[in-house]
Amino acid sequence: MVREFMTQLETSVRGKLITPDSDEYEAARKVYNGMINKSPKLIVRCADTADVIATVKYAKEENLLLAVRGGGHSGAGLAMCDGGIVADLSAMKGIRVDPRSRTVRVEPGCTQGEVDHATHAFGLAVPSGTVAHTGIAGLTLGGGHGYIVRKYGLSLDNLLEADIVLADGRLVTANKENYSDLFWAIRGGGGNFGVVTSFLFQAHPVSTVVGGPMLWNLDRAGEVMRWYREFMVNAPDDVYGFFAFMNVPPGSPFPEHLHRQNMCGIIWCFCGELDKAEATLQQIRDRLTPAFDYVNPMPFPQLQSLFDPLLPTGMQWYWKGDFFTELTDEAIAQHIKHGSQLPTQLSTMHFYPVDGAANRVGKNDTAFSYREAKWSMIIVGIDPDPANAEKMTAWAREYWRALHPYSCGGAYVNFMMEEGHERIKATYRDNYDRLVAIKTKYDPTNLFRVNQNIKPVTV
């Protein structure tokens, strides 16, 4: 059977075909989340768009389960499949910055760190996430929120057009003028509609920012959270800070007396005028003197990659998320109860602002629905040891159950595990039926279903 795969595709692709007999198979089937253990029959490491077209056509003709891998960062492991074929785009890493139009064209194998590196040379940045080795493709198709979301919107708000291989193998370019329904759908609808082989982004003038963490002892968590909920929603758009419960890593730059302590913190990013940032920071320091303060001017890519060394590929991950419009006293009490009981050293809770510019886009203007949300929460259990997977999964689920009653009801699609159809519908709300119609139009047989799946009416 494997030989049949090879025979039919060998003459159609320039990239590498990896089977279970290949030396690199074990490495090629691994993704960012070490909990994921899937075994496809074939991985096609695509070299270019032509390879993607050939792989999609073959999967459709042979009725094979098809997964699409960009950066491989999906917590739910949706970049890999069992018994099917994987279109691995990780080798497609072309980036071209046009400083005159402040645009950047990006291929789907790029990480946000690679995009940051290319754009920073021109004093520009594209809104993305908070971990540099996150794949730019999955991040954008699901939303994309990070340090400059309040100033410049979600990653998908900065997408100008995309080249997409459809289920029938056609390559189309979707933007506001052409295939506008498809362009609407991919901005938040994930990989349900095709394989994006090229993204064109609007970039923005971001170079040096003032950023980094402030930490406080846990007994001040309630005070900090109550102050934070008022400060953040009223702050100028160029001020960003996400709240976290964390265990202090045992190393630089953290002082030894704080190592391995559970603490709370805010990780800041000021992307406006540096003197205004320092004035605001001084007010915060005077109001809430931190136990540790590492907020400094730094190049934006440095802030983007600040936590990368703590989070290498292969860790055990389990995460749960929700959107919130407010942070009530009752919710704060539950955060303190569960956030102070981190099950492993790397486990954490992050409370990300998603207001500002992101709130000024209509909830029906893109597939991304929760435009009224002020925060996006992720509760995540992380550890290198599989023996701790059950413990941290139970903690994350219990924490989420305690906070969900205070949420908007749906979650950021990139922060979801495989949680069922009703959860997907709750995430898209009144955009869901429109997404189903577009899915039915472009992928009536649900070829692209290894994702947070929107089923066509024909299936």
Image: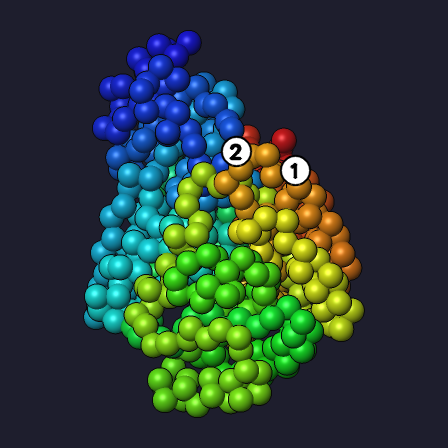
Q: CA distance from mark 1 to mark 2?
A: 14 Å
- Compared with 230, 421 (above or below) is above
Kindly indicate the quadrant of the structure image that contains residue 353. Answer: bottom right
Kindly indicate the quadrant of the structure image that contains residue 220. Answer: bottom right
Q: Amino acid at mark 2?
A: Ile
In terms of secondary structure, where does tag 2 sit? loop
Residue 155 visible (yes or no): no
Point out which mark residue 36 bears: 2
In the picture, the quarter occupied by the C terminus is top right
- Compared with 89, 226 (above or below) is below
Q: Nearer the viewer, residue 441 or 241?
A: 241
Which residue has dot 1 on it? 390
Horizontal and vertical percent position of residue 107: 31, 47
In terms of secondary structure, where does tag 1 sit? helix
In the picture, the quarter occupied by the N terminus is top left
Residue neighbourhood size for the residue with mark 2, other residues' Cα within 10 Å, grouped as few (<14), some (14–19), many (≥20): many
Horizontal and vertical percent position of residue 210: 38, 77
Nearer to us: label 1 or label 2: 1
